[in-house]
Image: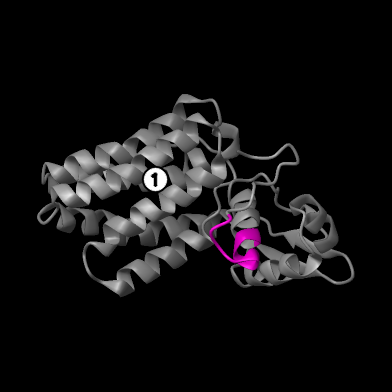
Amino acid sequence: MTSASGIVPLDKSASLRERVEQAIAAAIVSGEMAPGELFSAPGLAARFGVSATPVREAMLHLEKRGLVRTVRNKGFRVTEVDSDALARLAEVRQLLEPPAMAQLAARFTDAMAAEARTLATRIVTGAEQQDLAAYLEADRAFHLLLLGYLDNKYLVEIVADLRERTRLVGLKSLLNTDRLEASADEHHEIVDLLQAHDARAVEQLMRRHIGHVTGWWSGEDER
């Protein structure tokens, strides 16, 4: 769950720096740490209950991802969302992921379905519990898992990079709405269509699903 301070709790399975980076990235991507807002390393360290060193290391990594920029002697400012860049990132994903899912449909197995459904259920649970960090992590794992079944590491790496660059600042505003739950439920629908080997339908659903990036999740209505 998101903490009262607006910062997500740390995942204890990763290194300290990775845990801090994951939590801060989830807060930035979902809009909990708003564009333009300034944060100091000591201030964030106090919220997480860690020293400032892993926070600074995490923020430097996030700066490379374009999520923050350093403000000398002050800390780190969350970068503004570039709507044109967001649209272009979604466009590239549209070129890659829907055709990939259509290709996967022909070789999808029950074992793959069982593994994917575990993550789909975690996504739905994250939406129901208003846990954006869990929702985003399970969502990332779900989509990369499916792409991984195609046995093309370059495809997985490219899409993972595109997802890391994508901002979903409208996600927080969707808490307690039908839209977030509908988006979560689409993951089970994707598995259903893959398991039915319906290439055309799963490709169409993936196009609509990715469309949420520039629609619901951007804070704007989809046209």
Magenta segment, which residues?
A: 12-20
Task: Assess disc 1: are there few (<14), some (14-19) or many (≥20) residues with their C-alpha within 10 Å of its C-alpha.
Answer: some
Q: Position of residue 167 (x, y in %)?
A: 55, 53
* Relative side of 196 to 100, left or right: left
Query: In the image, what residue occupies the spot 39% across and 45% down?
Result: 211
Query: In the image, what residue occupies the spot 30% across and 73% down?
Result: 153
Examine the image and state in which quarter residue 189 appears: top left
- Nearest the viewer among 20 and 75 is 20
Q: Position of residue 104 (x, y in %)?
A: 17, 56
Q: Considering only vertical position in the picture, is 155 above or below 191? A: below
Q: How many marks?
A: 1
Residue that extends furthest to the right in the rendered view of this protein: 73
Q: Is residue 81 on the magenta stretch?
A: no
Mark 1, residue position: 211
Q: Is residue 15 on the magenta stretch?
A: yes
* Relative side of 48 to 223, left or right: right
Q: Position of residue 212 (x, y in %)?
A: 43, 42
Query: In the image, what residue occupies the spot 60% across and 34% down?
Result: 173
Residue that extends furthest to the front in the rendered view of this protein: 12
